[in-house]
Image (cartoon, rainbow, N blue to C red):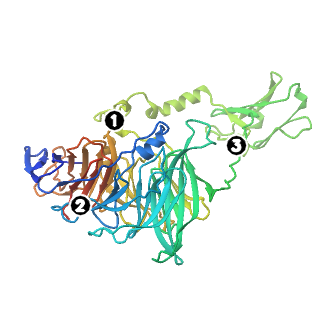
Amino acid sequence: MVVCGTMITVSASLSRPTPEDVLLFFFPPYQPLRITRCSGSVHVSSCPAVEEMQLTDAQYTLEHMQAFAMFNYLQLDPWYQDSVLFVDRQARVLSLTVTLDTALGKPKEVFRFGPESDPCSERLCPSISLSSATSAVLSDGGGRLQLLRTGKRGDGCQTKWEVLFSERLGDPFTILHSVSHVQAGVHAVEVLLLRVQKDPQETTGSGFCVFLEWVTVSGAAGQGPEKKMEVRKRRVLRGKSVPHYAAVEPQGRGLMVASEKPFVFTHVDGRPVEQPEPEPMEVEKADPLYFWQQTADDITLSLRLPEGVAREDVSFRLTADTLSVGVGGFPPLLEGQLYGSVDPEASAWIIKNNKSLEVTLQKLSEGPMWPELVLGNRRGEFVMSDEQAALIHDRLTHLTSEDLNGGADGEKPPCNSQELEDCDGFPEDGFSLTRFDGETLRPTQVVNLDGHQYLFTVDVDPTQMPCLCLRHDVDALVWQPRPDRPEDMWEHIATFNALGYVQASKQDKKFATCAPDFSYAALGECLRRAFIYRQPSPVETVLFNRKQGRQVGEVAKQQVASLDSDKPILGFRASNERLFILTSSNLFVLKVNNN
C-alpha cells in the first residue's frame, strides 16, 4: 500500500535548464501540502535530430505496430552504467556518458554508417546491441548487419569503432539481442534478428508472419585484421505474434522466446527443417452401444439390437456379479463383470420396439451410485435423470448463483464483475515461455504464462541473459533465466509491489523499465510524462495507517516527471542513478538516486 507520493513537474528550458526550474510537490495525507525546490534533478542535452521512422502503407498489421512502432531508440550500455547510445538522422551512432551531473556534455560520434547501406523503401529503425564490453552489433535498418570492435566504452573513452564484419542479410530487420563468446579458441557472436514478412504459405488473415533469425558469425580468436569473421550458421523461426521476450543464451547453446503464439524452426542455412510428425488425430467416437440410468435401488440398461431380432435369438446370462448379452451365435454385444452386485432373481429384460433390449437390474445393496456399469467397458453412455440433474444443480447453487453475494458474509460487499476496471483484465490465453536447444532445435522446456501479463525486459547482469518482468496478480515480478540450471531455469529475483495493477491503468504507456538494482521502476508515456515508482523505504517520522491503526514503518514513493517538450518520446532507459528519456531533439537525463 502506497501511503504517500511525490510528483516532479519539470519545466526546464531546452536551451539552458536551471535547478530552480525543478519543483517537487509532496502530497502525503498526513500533512499539509508543501513545496520544496530540488537542484540537479534533471539535465537536458541538445542532441542532433533523431528521425522517427514512420510505418508505410504496406506495414499495416498489428505485428508491424508492435515490432517497429513501439521500438526503443535508446540503448543503455549494461557494462558501463550511465552510458547510452542512439542513432541520429545523419546515420551516426552517438554515445553519451554521464560522469558529473553538473557537467553534462554533448553526445559524441563513435561510428557512422557508410555509403554501403543499401536504399530500401521499407527501411526500419537502425538498431544497436552491445554483445560484450568491447564489441557491438549494428543494423542500418535496411537489411545490413555489422559487427564492430568498440574498445573500452564509457568513462570518457570515445574511441572510434572498427568494423569486423558487414554483410547484407536480406530484407530489413531489427536486432533483438546479441551475445559474444569464445569457445575452443573460436570467437563467435550470436545475433537474433526480427522481421515481419509475407508468408506464401499463410492463406488466412493478412498473410504476414513473424520471423526470428538466429545468426552465428564467427572467426578465430584474436585482434588482428586477418581474423576474418563470416556467417557460419543461419536458423529461422516462424510464428504468428511478435515475441515479448527473445534472447540467446550466453554460450549460444540455446534460445528463449516468450510469445502469445508458438514459434517453430523452419530453416537452417536455407534448408527446410524436418518437422516432427503430427500427433495422430483423435478417432471419431463411435455411437454408444448402450445407454444406462440408475437410482439408489436399480439400474436400467437399453442395448441396441439388429433389426428383426426375436426373443429366442437373444442370449442373456446374468449372475450376481456378471452380465452377458448376445445375439444368435455371434460374440456377445456386452459382456463383463458388473461394478457392483445385483439380485438376478429380481432382475428382468424385454425387447422394446423390436430394436432394443431393455434390462432392469436390481442392486443388491441400496444407496451407492455406480461410476460405470461393466468394468472397463467404454461403449456405453450414462444418462442422468431429471431428478438427478436437479439434485446436482441444487448442490452447486452456491457456486453458480445469480445472486451477486449468495451465501457470503453479509458485512462484505458483493462482487460485481461489471465494476471491474480495465486494469483488472488479462490478455488472452496462450502466452508461454519456451527454451529451444541450439543443436536439436527442439523445445526442451515450456512454461505456461497464461494470466501473467508481460511488462518489460531489463539487463541486470550483462554476463547473464536479460531478465523479464511479469505481472502476478497486482504485483510485478522480475525473473532471471538460468540456462545452466535445467531443474530451476527461471529464478525470481525482485518484486515491485502493486506495479502490475498501476501500470495497467496507464492507457498512454509506451515504455516500461526498472533500475538494474531494482531500486525503482519507471513508465514512460507517448508524450511528455514519465512515472517513477520507488521501492519502500523507512520513514523518519511516526506514521500510522488511519484505517488499521497500526504504525507504518516503510513508505513507497511515486513521482511524475513532466518534460518540457511536445515531441514524442522515442527512447526510455534506466540506470541505478538516472532515467534517460530521448525525443527527436533532446536527451533528458533525470537524476533519480544519489548512490
Q: Which amino acid does label 2 sit on?
A: Glu
Q: Which of marks 2 and 3 is nearer the N terminus?
A: 3
Q: Of the residues tagged 2 and 3, which is closer to the observer?
A: 2
Secondary structure of the residue carrying numbered label 3: loop
The correct choice, above or below, for 279 with respect to 224 in the image is above
**Amino acid marked by disc 1:** Glu
How many numbered marks are there? 3
* Badge number at residue 577: 2
Q: Rate crowding at label 2 as few (under 14), some (14 to 19) or many (20 or more) other CA atoms within 10 Å.
A: some
449 left or right of 299?
left
- Residue placed at 10% from the left, 56% from the top? 541
Q: Distance between the residues labelled 2 and 3?
A: 58 Å
Q: Which of 43 and 279 is in front in this view?
A: 43
What's the residue at 70%, 43% (across, down)? 282
The tag earlier along the polypeptide, 1 or 3, is 3
Look at mark 3 in the image and give the residue it sits on: 282
Q: How far apart are marks 1 and 2 (CA)?
A: 34 Å
Question: Horizontal and vertical percent for residue 557?
Answer: 20, 51
The residue identified by callout 1 is 421
Left or right: residue 431 versus residue 580 is right
Nearer the observer, 140 or 496: 140
Q: Which residue is drawn at 51% across and 49% down?
A: 195
Does residue 425 show up? yes
Discs 1, 3 touching: Cβ within 8 Å: no
User: How would you rate the neighbour count of disc 1 (Cα within 10 Å): few for under 14, some for 14-19, many for 20 or more?
Assistant: few
Residue 1: numbered disc: none
